[in-house]
Amino acid sequence: MTVIRRPRAALARHRPWPMCRQCSGVALDMGSARTRAWVAGRGMILDVPTVTFPGAGAVYPIQRGSIVDTPGTARMLDRLLGHRLPRFTRPLVVVTAPVLDGFAYRAEARTAVEILRPRSVLTVPSARAVALAAGADLSRPLLVVDLGAHLTEVVLLVDGAVFDARRTALGTGDLDAATPATVIADAVAEMVTSMLRQDRTSLMVDALGRGPLLAGGGALRPEITCRLTARLHAPLRAVPAPHTAAVRGAAKLLEAAHSHPSTMESGLDPDRPDPDPDRLGLDPDRPAPDPDRSGPDLDRPDQHPS
């Protein structure tokens, strides 16, 4: 008996958001101080403190670039987004992650995001998201300085990928009479100097000459940026609305993933696997920069405290 297999019907293309009714999407930037969410077709709908209230007091589930309470993070996402997403669709989710120690962060973030019943979860380093939000030319070396509330990262991007990175568990939320803003600027200058000393190529010099890209709430603090300009002797470029740059960059990647053929196939056919992050230009859960490539200082506690 001859079996004739009918060709599978061509998969319909997703329409641009918000006209697309087949799926939904969320971009998330979860920091230790603020959680920001961009929802497809609606734009950025959340910019709220990262806090949960399981009992009488407040609990902070994310601290200095680490998710310390995964169930609490899940409850927070359900409270903030559960009622804002379409009931009968499974969203495509893009989550930003810190560069150093980001592998553990991504694993915990994926677990927490399951509360939203996503059809796929993709991650992107925060520094790359910042660069995309700024519309930076990623064909050239780029130095990104992310001045957060409780964490500061300095990341060298080469061809859009993380080449070297440093961080310190210090941010604008730590500033007080005993910790002036100059402490953060000096810490950034020391990290940049360390990266310059260990760079066996001209990439770091080229990126510094091009001008570091500033993001995070600290980029809005003139006492930090002025001191940093004096220490680095280099032009500084702040991303527009630097405190929301990471989630806006994640939103750009979300829109690109939404229209990518592999994502459309995955979303419409349950027998197909999730889209390959490499094909979308996202982060396929690669580990933090290789210490042998980035230099021994990556293993020093003062460079990336746990």
Image (cartoon, rainbow, N blue to C red):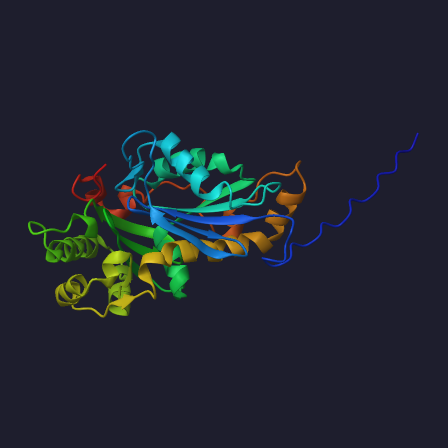
Residue situated in front as seen by the camera: 224 or 18: 18
Measured as percent of width and height from the top left, residue 97 is found at 37, 45
Drawn side of residue 174 relative to residue 128, left or right? left
Taking the image as drawn, is residue 171 in sight? no
Which residue is the extreme one toward the right? 1
Q: Which residue is painted at 37% across and 55% down in the image?
A: 246
Q: How many marks?
A: 0
Measured as percent of width and height from the top left, residue 278 is found at 50, 48
Task: Report which quarter residue 57 is drawn in.
Answer: top left
Q: Which residue is painted at 29% across and 66% down in the image?
A: 238
Quadrant of the drawing holding the C terminus: top left
Drawn side of residue 174 relative to residue 111, left or right? left
Vertical comparison of 23 with 242: above or below: above
Residue situated in front as seen by the camera: 72 or 147: 72
Q: Which residue is painted at 54% across and 52% down in the image?
A: 257
Q: Which residue is painted at 39% across and 34% down in the image?
A: 108
